[in-house]
Image (cartoon, rainbow, N blue to C red):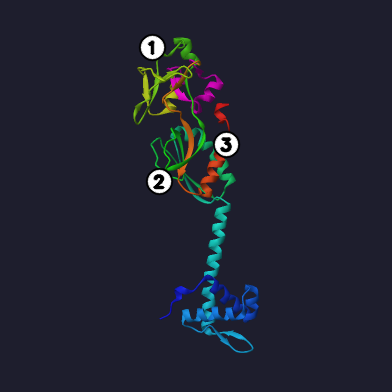
Amino acid sequence: MHDAGNISIRSLLIFIAVYESQNFSVVARREGISASQVSRVIHQLEDALGQQLFYRNTRAIIPTESGHLFVRYARAMAGNLEDARRELDERASEPSGTIRMNAPVFFGQRHVAPGLPGLTARYPRLTLDLTLTDDFIDPHRDAADVIFRIGTLTDSSFHARPFGHQFYYLAASPAYLRKFGAPEGPDDLSRHSCLVYRGSSGPNRWLVRRPGDEWVHYPVAPLMTSNNAETLLIAALGGMGIVLFPDWLVSERLKSGELIALMPEFDCSINTEPQTIAAIYPNARHPPLNVRAVIDYYVALFGTPLYWQT
């Protein structure tokens, strides 16, 4: 009964060196051990295999038939180990393989998607798998390595790398304002045509406050609700009514003058808690290189302050 499970990688490497040099002393010098230790390693290997690997005489150490056969396997195993070590080193030095990303639908289209060509140009060995959904994603249950999320950061079961905060604007097109005028204050909203986003938990609540005060919910009777922000934006641009949207969705339109910000002396929101834009990933002592690379890339791309807020 032989126990090949006792064979160590080191004994394989010493065997290969003895096979190639046919000299214990040469191998001993190279390994920094004594010739008798080299001899002992070979004996243990022969015991484990139940085969004689070398004929030993005073002049030479000559491989047996079993030695010739076994060296092929020993080289293959040592080569596999070397390949594995190299691939692991490469993984540690250059992002590669598939990374699964998840983002909210409109934020993903507007701000994650434009960065993807640059991401793959920088890391050509990275394969991207991007899912856009507005549903809550649990990084431990759902298959995702990096999740872009906007909301209140409370859960400590994952790590979060904040990019910045999200702010809201009430806005309408110049055509709408010419026709119906601008609301002077939040009480006027009930008299205006409001276009309201409807999420999975129902239509957004419109909250208004003076800076530093408590948030107040102002009920509006929407002219239109939709679960599609793009549709509401298109309707607002066409002069249909007022929208309450995050800065990343409307900042370009405000800069171009296609939309006008309303009631600038008030803060507006759909949540009483501050909304953080962040990349979250499952708790890991060392986030994988792919995760670090993607998050660092978007931190640089979004900038500080966030590029849509400048």
Residue at which label 2 appears: 140
Q: Amino acid at mark 2?
A: His
Distance from label 3 to label 2 (Cα)? 27 Å
Please identify, in this view, whether the residue under mark 3 or under mark 2 is nearer the observer: 2
Numbered range of the magenta stretch: 236-263
The numbered mark, 3 or 2, whose residue comes first in the sequence reads 2
| Local secondary structure at mark 3 | helix
Q: Position of residue 154 (x, y in %)?
A: 42, 36
Is residue 65 placed above or below 193 in the rendered structure? below
Q: Amino acid at mark 1?
A: Arg
Is residue 141 placed above or below 62 in the rendered structure? above
Q: Is residue 99 visible in the rendered structure shown here?
A: yes
Residue at image point 50% right, 30% down: 165
The numbered mark, 1 or 3, whose residue comes first in the sequence reads 1
Q: What is the crowding at mark 2: few (fewer than 14 residues within 10 Å), some, or many (at least 20)? A: few
Q: Position of residue 219 (x, y in %)?
A: 36, 18
The numbered mark, 1 or 2, whose residue comes first in the sequence reads 2
Q: Position of residue 308 (x, y in %)?
A: 55, 28
Per the rendering, the mark at residue 224 is none
Residue at which label 1 appears: 191
Does 225 appear in magenta?
Answer: no
Is 33 left, or right, of 278 in this rendering? right
Residue at which label 3 appears: 301
Q: Position of residue 67 (x, y in %)?
A: 53, 81
Distance from label 1 to label 2 (Cα)? 46 Å
The C terminus, quarter of image: top right
Residue at image point 38% right, 23% down: 205
Is residue 47 placed above or below 245 in the rendered structure? below
Disc 1 vs disc 2: Cβ atoms closer than 8 Å?
no
The N terminus, quarter of image: bottom left
Front residue of 65 and 61: 61
Please identify, in this view, whether the residue under mark 1 or under mark 2 is nearer the observer: 2
